[in-house]
Amino acid sequence: MEWSNSRELLAVAGTELGSPHVTDIHGATVYNNLLKFYTESGNLLYTAKIPNSTYPVSALTWGHNDKRIFIATGTQVHIAWVSRRVASLQLFCRLKVQTSLASEALLPRLPLPGRIKALIGNLFAQTIRCCVPDLKSLREFVSRPPACSTRLHCTMIRHDDDSNQSSGTCYTLYLEFLGGLVPLLKGKRTSKIRPEFVIFDPQVDGESFYILYIFIRFYHHHNYDEKLFDV
């Protein structure tokens, strides 16, 4: 649980107690995760179901000047949009249109005024911009610069690989994201004098990709679940 910055709302997230023990078809426990808002006097204002029943809630925090709530369940981060005023009918209509579209790319096809399209497009904006690449497009991710000059922070870690019988120290380049490390490339130093590496193709095991100097610079979306709550 955590108070908002204004100390007017208390957000409480967790698994509902007293609910019957439920398992899925694989025998895994199903958690009834809920998010509740309370006033400073302890009155319940709103209850919302967190859309992940595989893991219990592990963390919660407010952000963006009390306009966002971040909730972690397992490896997923859920983001709640919080509005302190009564939502307008137009906002409800925009949300309905936004949920009806498969992607933002379909928005220009709608027979709507440009101003309304722009407002609907704002609903597609992600609070946290995910930069974790898809495994099927990892080679493309590490080979080309990102759009809009986005800068990514990476960490190179030296490690001992027992399966490597040849000479040379092995390293792995990781992408830093949300406090964790996502492996991108594996390489082996080929010279003790010059900072040169053999970089292996991330999508083909055991084949070298290209020679790259040590000064590697990669500047280049787990899924995020964003919802709007009126409290």
Image (cartoon, grey):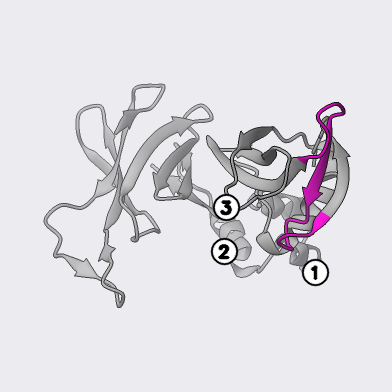
Residue that badge 3 annotates? 91
Is residue 200 located in the magenta-colored stretch of the structure?
A: yes
**Where on the picture, by quarter, is residue 71?**
top left
Q: Distance between the residues labelled 1 and 3?
A: 20 Å
- Tag 3's secondary structure? helix
For the N terminus, the image quarter is: top left
Q: In this view, does 112 lie to the left or right of 161?
A: right
Q: In this view, does 119 lie to the left or right of 14?
A: right
Residues in magenta, as a range: 189-208
Judging depth in this view, the residue of 85 and 69 nearest the camera is: 69
* Farthest top residue in view: 6
Q: Nearer the viewer, mark 2 or mark 3?
A: 2
Is residue 163 located in the magenta-colored stretch of the structure?
A: no
Residue that badge 2 annotates? 96
Tell me if residue 48 comes above or below residue 196 in the rendering: below
- Tag 2's secondary structure? helix
- Tag 1's secondary structure? helix
Q: How far apart are marks 2 and 1 (CA)?
A: 16 Å
For the C terminus, the image quarter is: top left
Nearer the N terminus, badge 1 or badge 3? 3
Judging depth in this view, the residue of 20 and 140 nearest the camera is: 140
Residue 160 in percent (x, y) is at: 59, 40
* Residue kind at label 3, given as amino acid type: Leu
* Residue kind at label 2, given as amino acid type: Lys
For the residues bearing labels 1 and 3, Cβ distance under 8 angstroms: no
Residue 126 visible to the viewer: no
Nearer the N terminus, badge 2 or badge 1? 2
